Image (cartoon, grey):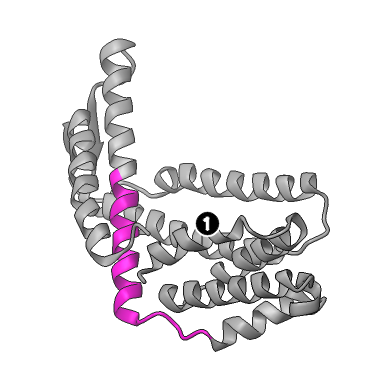
């Protein structure tokens, strides 16, 4: 089965677990999926095997603790070590796919919002002015910030799995983390000086560019399974 099919089957079979076993299994599932650089196919197959093993044990009246032990994090770490890493070609392709998707969203939102503000509220000139060199540098920093954010977010998810911290503490941590990300997102273009000649384009052009890039990513994502 493809990863998408395994995930759908997993979601369906998981409903057969007791409330207690389901809570523990879902924590394990999140923790293992957040393990970076691992094969998606192998990861989902392992998760399904764990689920089937737990369901069989549950029929015999056993709990998750009796199957996996009391240290779930250590058990998951051992499993993650055994899962092969994702192929470099697929990781690179996925990285490019995410970058294109990200640029499409930024361009689309900037274009549509700028067009709406200038035409309906008379805010702004309706044009987007930039310098190619500075613009390229800003985009590169945005992408670096995005991938750093994703990596830290996955690590944070693992750290908070099986955690006994109060939910409000985790909420504050997440809020601070997101605030830092958006703060840096706002500051990057402010800190980069204009280098070279300036170019002005209609702001709606950014919106159109964003839509075009987004449409291009759809068949790419489906073909290589990035949308799973």
- Please provide the residue range marked out in magenta: 83-104
Residue 102 falls left or right of residue 149: left
61 over 110 or under it: above or below: below
Residue at 41% across / 75% down in the picture?
41
- Name the chief secondary structure element in magenta: helix
Q: Residues within 10 Å of mark 1 (few under 14, many from 20)?
A: few
State whether residue 127 is above or below residue 181.
above
Give the residue at x 34% y 58%: 98
Asked whether 205 falls inside the magenta stretch, the response is: no
Asked whether 101 or 131 is in front, the reply is: 101
Residue drawn at point x = 52 percent, y = 63 percent? 10
Instruction: Please state, as top left, top right, bottom left or bottom right, where the C terminus lies in the image.
Output: bottom left
Residue 203 x %, y %: 22, 30
Residues 135 and 162: in front is: 162
Q: Which residue is mark 1?
A: 12
Percent position of residue 14, x then y: 60, 60
């Amino acid at each position: 089965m493809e990863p998408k099919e395994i995930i759908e089957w997993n979601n369906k079979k998981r409903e057969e677990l007791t409330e207690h076993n389901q809570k523990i299994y879902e924590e394990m599932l999140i923790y293992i999926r957040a393990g970076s650089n691992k094969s998606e196919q192998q990861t989902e197959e392992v998760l399904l095997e764990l689920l089937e093993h737990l369901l069989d044990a549950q029929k015999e009246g056993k709990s998750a603790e009796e199957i996996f032990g009391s240290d779930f994090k250590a058990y998951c770490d051992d499993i993650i070590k055994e899962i092969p890493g994702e192929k470099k070609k697929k990781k690179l392709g996925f990285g490019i796919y995410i970058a294109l998707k990200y640029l499409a969203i930024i361009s689309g939102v900037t274009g549509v919002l700028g067009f709406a503000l200038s035409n309906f509220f008379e805010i702004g000139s309706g044009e987007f002015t930039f310098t190619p060199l500075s613009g390229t540098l800003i985009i590169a920093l945005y992408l670096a910030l995005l991938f750093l954010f994703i990596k830290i977010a996955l690590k944070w998810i693992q750290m908070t799995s099986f955690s006994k911290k109060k939910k409000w503490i985790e909420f504050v941590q997440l809020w601070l983390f997101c605030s830092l990300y958006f703060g840096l997102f706002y500051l990057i273009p402010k800190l980069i000086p204009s280098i070279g000649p300036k170019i002005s384009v209609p702001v709606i052009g950014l919106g159109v560019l964003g839509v075009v890039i987004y449409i291009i990513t759809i068949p790419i994502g489906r073909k290589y399974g990035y949308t799973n």
